[in-house]
Amino acid sequence: MGRMAGALRAAGMRADVLSGGDLVSGGFGGVLAVGGGSANPPAVLVARRPGPGPRVLLVGKGITFDTGGISVKPADGMHLMRTDMAGSAAVVAAAEAFCADTAPAYTGVDLTVVVPSAENMLSGSAYRPGDVVTHVGGTTSEVTNTDAEGRMVLADALAHGIAECDPEVVIDVATLTGAMKVALGMRTGAVMATDDDLADRVAAAGARAGERWWRLPLPDDLRPAARSDVADRRQAPKGPGAITAALFLEGFVDGRPWAHLDIAGPARSPEEIDEVGPIATGFATRTLLGLLRDLADRPRA
């Protein structure tokens, strides 16, 4: 986390790392719940470069290792969970490259980056199915699967970032669901969005960068699955997992134009494929950099 903050500072952003009492006073209930089972305390990186241009919020999932917690993962594949912070790596790398570019059009973008980081471990202090967690801003969620930890920390990060910078565009990136990988495989990312123009811009930026995206819907008939009888939101709704995870997160974006990028498949590769090396691939970094440049050039309403 310190290295990420240092990289963003070197690129011209103001960066702070929140931990301990800052997370408690800030209401980061999701981050604290997920990180509560680990000997390594959670933290949240918040970085901003103010500007007169469009206000953009980037959020990247930063789970440093994911056992699944009490809803423990099978051993097969768990060794890859060191890459469960791929979303945060993509967001920070893209923001660093974008802010280091001194072209006048790009320096005007008001960019905020939020990276919630935690280790999802199994212990006596781990969070549990059935817990009700209060997130930044006061929205509550009913925990039904502790292996759905990414959306818990993203919910806090989205709510905090929106409160801090009042963004016109919100984008989050995460290795969020195995369902996404089942649907689209290892070479295509999933994009789910509340704004058609933003979804098109993501796909176009990906095409220019050589990264393939496919849009999945956010249908009204599935929205009830994200509701809970004991909280505002159900953390792990039944149904098509990639979509219902996005519908859970939708409750934390305050109606802003928002794109959710699920990179659970293409963020990791079991072997070298074309230009992609084994293990972590860096997928979404080039798309995000191209998207930021595109948004910088977009006329404001």
Image: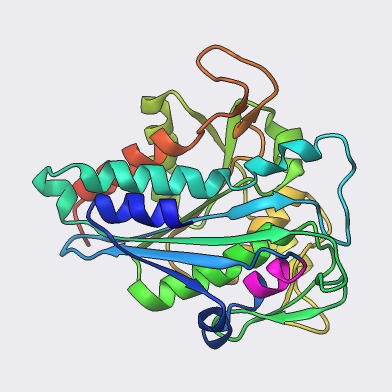
Name the residue at 50% across, 15% down.
Answer: 275
In the rendered image, the residue lying farthest to the left is 104
196 to 258, vertically: above or below: above
Q: Return the residue found at the far top.
A: 274
Seen as rendered, the residue at the extreme front is: 39
- Which residue is pictured at 24% across the width and 60% down the height? 54
Q: Residue 271: where, in percent of width, then height?
A: 67, 17
User: How many numbered discs?
Assistant: 0
The residue at 13%/44% (across/down) is 102
Colouring rule applied to residues: rainbow
Percent across and percent down for residue 90 are 47, 42
**Residue 264, x across and y down, in percent:** 66, 40
- Residue 89 horizontal side relative to residue 98, left or right: right
Task: Verify whether residue 87 appears in magenta.
Answer: no
Where in the figure is residue 167, as x and y percent of width and height? 35, 67
Among the 4 quarters of the image, the one containing residue 51: bottom left
In the depicted view, which residue is nearer to us: 100 or 232? 100
The reply to whether residue 126 is visible in this rendering is: yes
Tell which of 127 and 226 is nearer to you.
Answer: 127
Decide whether the magenta segment is chiefly helix, strand or loop.
helix
Instruction: Give the magenta-colored segment's residue range.
Output: 31-37
Q: Nearer the viewer, residue 32 or 159?
A: 32
User: Does the stretch in magenta take in 32?
Assistant: yes
| Residue 253 visible in rendering | no
Check the picture and name the quadrant holding the C terminus: bottom left
